[in-house]
Image: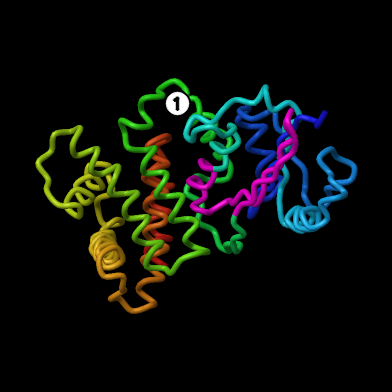
Amino acid sequence: MTELFVRCYIGNISLSTLRSVQRESGKFDEWELFQGSKFDRKQHYGYKKHLDQDELLLDGLAKRSVIAEAKQPERVKLSLIWKKVLDLADVITLLSLARACHYPTLAVERGKENGYSIAWGVMTREEAGNRDIVSISNLGKFISEALTYIENNSSWLIESGFNPSIFWYQQAQQAYSTAPTIMEIALYWVSLEIVASIYIKNSKINASGKEQKVRRFLKDRGYTGQQWRFLSKVIRDCYAIRNNAFHEGIGTLPPEVMLTRRGQIRELVSLVLVEMLQEQSQARKREIATRMQNY
């Protein structure tokens, strides 16, 4: 009989960060975490000597991964955000919001009663720089509060627009490595547009047009005043980029402006979605606003 287990290879994250979040949140204790570069697959179940090519690739992925392993997968909770996957996917999704950085699952091994399987992810490039939305010291608390809120308010995911929005957000993060800048910006815009449109509808506000809805949503969410004045140009340009990407398939802004807007819309959407789950302090938002202006 095949040993039962699930093993995930997570890229672009440090073991110390993930262990700290696990300890502080207390939300995914069923998972054992390893430093992939020190992980000896031959000493762990799942090793298949006859699958030489798979083993070589998994060894290579391990060297650039943190490994999360559940030896009793039947005891692991299912994802609240995604369907038919385990709760670790929620943690990785929320961390990607909190740090505005894509954490790819490079591979997932499963030992099942009827055999063994490997699901391969997409190899992405590592991202440099600090884009933290939630401060490092608050990561564990954010994960705990967010998952507790979602667990206690399951209908909120759809009613608020968070779930359809996070799908587009994740596609935008992946596009950082697999698509031109114009597509990444367009996908982030759609993510923002979804939650804005649902807010306008639920609030019965008279606002027509996608750009106008986003502007009103951001205003009502408190992104106003001198520190956020630069958002007017960000919204104007990103809406134009969205239309050009989906309708004409072209970009009309200079490359340096496109790169600036990509960074700004990424942090803006990350902050908006984070604050749907945990409001950030005014001091923290001022820090993020200043960083966004300096792209």
What is the residue that sits farthest to the bottom in this orientation? 254
Residue tagged by mark 1? 149
Q: Position of residue 137 (x, y in %)?
A: 58, 41
Q: Is residue 81 magenta?
A: no
**155 with respect to 121 (left or right):** left
Q: Left or right? Give the position of 126 relative to 227.
A: right
Q: Residue furthest right?
A: 43
Residue drawn at point x = 41 percent, y = 24 percent: 154
Residue 161 sits in which quadrant? top left
- Residue 22 in percent (x, y) is at 65, 34
Give whichever of 71, 185 is nearer the camera. 71
* 263 over 93 or under it: above or below: below
- What percent of the width, then of the height, locates residue 198? 24, 38
For the N terminus, which image quadrant?
A: top right
- At x 29% / y 66%, what residue is drawn? 241
- Look at 62% across and 59% down and name the residue there: 123
- Disc 1: CA contacts within 10 A as few (<14), some (14-19) or many (>=20): some
In the rendered image of this protein, does residue 128 appear above or below residue 269?
Answer: below
The quadrant in which residue 189 appears is bottom left
Q: Amino acid at mark 1?
A: Tyr
Numbered range of the magenta stretch: 93-121
Image quadrant in which the C terminus is located: bottom left
Element carrying mark 1: helix
